[in-house]
Image (cartoon, helix red, strand yellow):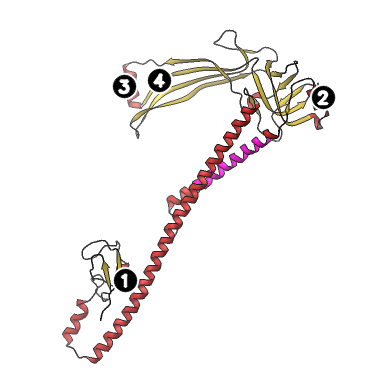
Amino acid sequence: MEEYPLKTLEIVCLGSSLALSGLFYYIYRKKRKTVDKLNEAPQLALNDELANLLNQAPGKCLQYVIIEGAVQPIGEPLRSQFQEGTVGVIQKLVLREHKLVWNSLARTWTDSERVLHQRVNAVPFNLVGSDQAAVRVLCPLEATGPEMEVIHEKFHQAIYGFTDLIGQYLSGEKPKGQLETEEMLKVGAALTGVGELILDTDRAVKLRPPADGSEYFLSTGDFEALRLEQEGQALVWRALATACALAGMAVLLWAARRYYRRLQTKWERERLRREFERLGSGSRAASVSSSSGTAQDGEEGELEPLENACVVCLSNPRSCVLLDCGHVCCCFSCYQALPQPTCPICRQTIRRVVPLYQV
């Protein structure tokens, strides 16, 4: 397991980068497909000829088209709860709570908000052209957009006493107040719809979500602004996918570099081991020939190996020089077994080791 090239943290980073890059690339491909369909979609004029065009189309349906018109309710419109005389077809009421939360890591108070209540109301409406030709908009709440106008916004300041202050510091939360907003798609607003156009049995033209799963759009801006917005989002997702992929490649390159340096160290140790074994076998042969040619005293023969013995194992002869300190104190096997690359005598860091050549 110690030879495994990737550490646990690197495996986590690599897996996260690959997963995120795959997710971001998937979202980018969806956005890119949407942009391509928007570029290929025909932009139709909202007039009386639209019904005849659909009547000649296969299945009386155009799968992905662009239509622009003014919002006109079918029946009674929605009325604002806060502004007299303001009417629309989609109404969104939101109540948000704002508070300060103590961040123990940053040692400061940070802003936080949460939605306490949200309600969306909608009534059926048409898109009306210049000659009063109408297209019924189906399922508007399923569409991406539209961007509605904020017609009411009021902040209600929180009021608290001394006991409330003590409880806030103990709990780490200080309420600031509640923000009340009302958004509305007004009657008469210009709206761009992108979706599937069908001709109903009563010759009513209707815009609905595409049956093939393509994205359904309702935008208060023009088509060019919508297209540029979608292209910008696609570029952002592509940049995120590229960044995550590059991060994963960087982790792999770092691990490969470390693994290659470990292999270099292993090859160098193997070379030194063979060199020390060669020198050791030569020293033993010289010692045998010297002892057969020269008669020595028994006590001196016992003391000589002890004086030259490794200070770690006390059995093998000293066979390496530790640099930079220059001590000759151990055999190569014990040098490899040292838990830290420090000299056993002076505790100085060992930069490199060379064989001890004995004459």
For the C terminus, the image quarter is bottom left
Position in image of residue 81 (x %, y %):
56, 11
Q: Are marks 1 and 2 in contact (CB under 8 Å)?
A: no
- Say which element carries label 3: helix
Distance from disc 1 to disc 3, alpha carbons, whole Å, reads 68 Å
Q: Is residue 321 magenta?
A: no
x and y percentages locating residue 350 in the rendered image? 28, 63
Q: Residues within 10 Å of mark 3 (few under 14, many from 20)?
A: few
Q: CA distance from mark 1 to mark 2?
A: 94 Å
Distance between the alpha carbons at the discs numbered 4 and 3? 15 Å
Q: Which residues are magenta?
A: 17-37
Helix, strand or loop at disc 1? helix
Q: Is residue 256 left or right of residue 308?
A: right
Contact, CB < 8 Å: mark 4 with mark 1? no
State the mark number for residue 52.
2
- Hey, what amino acid is under mark 4? Lys
Q: Determine whether, in the image, residue 26 is placed left or right of residue 321.
A: right
Q: Earlier in the sequence, mark 4 or mark 1?
A: 4
Q: Which residue is mark 1?
A: 333
Report the amino acid beneath label 1.
Ser
In the image, 32 versus 88, the foreground residue is 32
Q: Quick check: can you spot residue 166?
A: yes
Q: Is residue 2 visible?
A: no
Q: Nearer the viewer, mark 4 or mark 3?
A: 4
| Numbered badge on residue 176 | 4
Name the element at disc 2.
helix
Horizontal side of 263 relative to 226 (left or right) equals left
